[in-house]
């Protein structure tokens, strides 16, 4: 499988999310190939092609009928890493993408505060875990994306009624999270974007009309939810995204150290501030997407930055002549 010309290999399972990246590669005249890993075969006796491998596998792949795409990606990344290929968002990053428990423990190691969270398997254990919460709490799936399983509860009795009803949906990995409800003074969260391990920009997401976790234009409004913990009202319009100019919170440096230590080159990290101004980090997205309208208004472009970064990584491998991006 050796390739004469090294190129960028994009590992993913959702064609729609890759369209802006394809356009950026074409704009910068960069050689690339897509590895759509909803299914496939790996011959472990073979060697991977040369190049840079960008992992964009999503925790929500099972919602698109790609139940085992993360597991296949994990096998592919192990194969690539054993052959010392350059992987952006490596097997460690994939582990964090598909487990919020793993995310929170890794964040805590860098002094980054996360909401009080209890992981439980089994309906009775979910209910018992909720009894340990003080005040309102939310539920969410451990392997999620798109706000899967996110609901606000004011009492354990309300949760018990829900868990024992047909409306309850288990996480694809069986782990339900019971999490502290963070009350924000204003209806917004902030997403901090990194490319090449460096801060790109922060975007403020207005949650007053409900919140869709994925900022990409192709995401459906029907997936709306509110990470602040409140039930989303009927959505009359798409969520509003605004890039924050001169965002300079000290947490950016903590995030930078965290991603550098966890095999992450490209990510969006989401945070919320409570009524006292305390910051809580609740999600790390290693298959980050960007909102075109917000970027056009601010004049910064995430996918172009991603493509340029991958192009620089490819040139550092040597043996290929590429024009500067």
Image: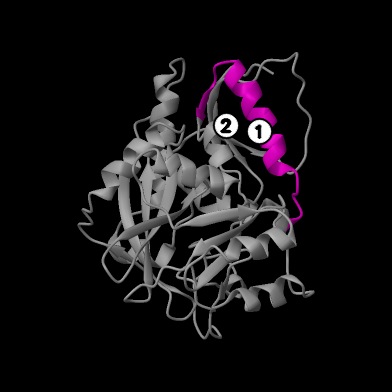
Q: Position of residue 252 (x, y in %)?
A: 28, 47
* Residue at 79% across, 74% down: 166
Front residue of 81/126: it is 126
Front residue of 29/246: it is 246
Q: Position of residue 263 (x, y in %)?
A: 46, 32
Name the quadrant containing residue 65: bottom right
Vertical relation: 100 (above or below) 93: below
Distance from disc 1 to disc 2, alpha carbons, whole Å, reads 6 Å
* Residue at 46% across, 74% down: 239
What kind of element bears circle 1?
helix
Q: Position of residue 155 (x, y in %)?
A: 57, 77
Is residue 27 among the parts visible in the rendering?
no
Label drawn at residue 153 = none
Task: Please tell me how many numbered marks the rendered image carries.
Answer: 2
Name the quadrant containing residue 221: bottom right
| Residues at marks 1 and 2 touching, judged by CB atoms closer than 8 Å | yes
State which quarter of the image contains the C terminus.
top left
Vertical relation: 16 (above or below) 219: above
Which numbered disc flags the more N-terminal residue, 1 or 2? 1
Q: Please identify the dominant SS of the magenta region.
A: helix
- Taking the magenta stretch, the answer to whether it contains residue 77 is yes
Front residue of 264/80: it is 264
Region of the chain picked out in magenta, as a range:
64-87
Is residue 127 among the parts visible in the rendering?
yes
What kind of element bears circle 2?
helix
Relative side of 186 to 140, left or right:
left
Disc 2 marks which residue? Answer: 91
């Amino acid at each position: 499988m050796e390739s004469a010309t090294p190129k960028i290999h994009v590992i993913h399972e959702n064609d729609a999310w890759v369209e802006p990246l394809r356009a950026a590669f074409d704009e910068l005249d960069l050689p690339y190939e897509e590895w759509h890993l909803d299914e496939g075969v790996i011959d472990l006796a073979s060697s991977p092609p040369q190049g840079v491998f960008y992992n964009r596998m999503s925790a929500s792949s099972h919602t698109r009928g790609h139940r085992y795409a993360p597991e296949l990606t994990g096998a592919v990344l192990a194969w690539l890493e054993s052959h010392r290929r350059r992987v952006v968002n490596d097997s460690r990053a994939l582990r964090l993408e598909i487990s919020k428990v793993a995310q929170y423990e890794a964040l805590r190691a860098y002094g980054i505060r996360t909401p009080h969270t209890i992981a439980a398997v089994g309906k009775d254990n979910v209910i018992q875990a909720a009894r340990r919460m003080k005040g309102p709490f939310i539920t969410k799936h451990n392997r999620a994306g798109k706000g899967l399983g996110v609901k606000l509860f004011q009492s354990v009795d309300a949760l018990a009624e829900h868990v024992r009803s047909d409306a309850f949906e288990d996480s694809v990995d069986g782990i339900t999270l019971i999490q502290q409800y963070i009350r924000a003074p204003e209806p917004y969260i902030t997403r901090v974007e990194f490319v090449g391990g460096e801060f790109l920009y922060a975007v403020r997401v207005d949650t007053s009309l409900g919140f869709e976790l994925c900022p990409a234009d192709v995401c459906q409004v029907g997936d709306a939810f509110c990470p602040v913990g409140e039930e989303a009202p009927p959505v009359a319009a798409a969520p509003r995204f605004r890039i924050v100019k001169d965002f300079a919170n000290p947490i950016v440096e903590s995030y930078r150290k965290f991603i550098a230590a966890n095999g992450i080159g490209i990510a969006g990290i989401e945070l919320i501030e409570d009524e006292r101004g305390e910051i809580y980090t609740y999600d790390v997205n290693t298959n980050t997407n960007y909102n075109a309208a917000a970027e056009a208004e601010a004049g910064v472009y995430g996918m172009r930055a991603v493509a340029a970064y991958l192009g620089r990584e490819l040139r550092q491998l040597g043996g290929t002549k590429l024009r500067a991006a």
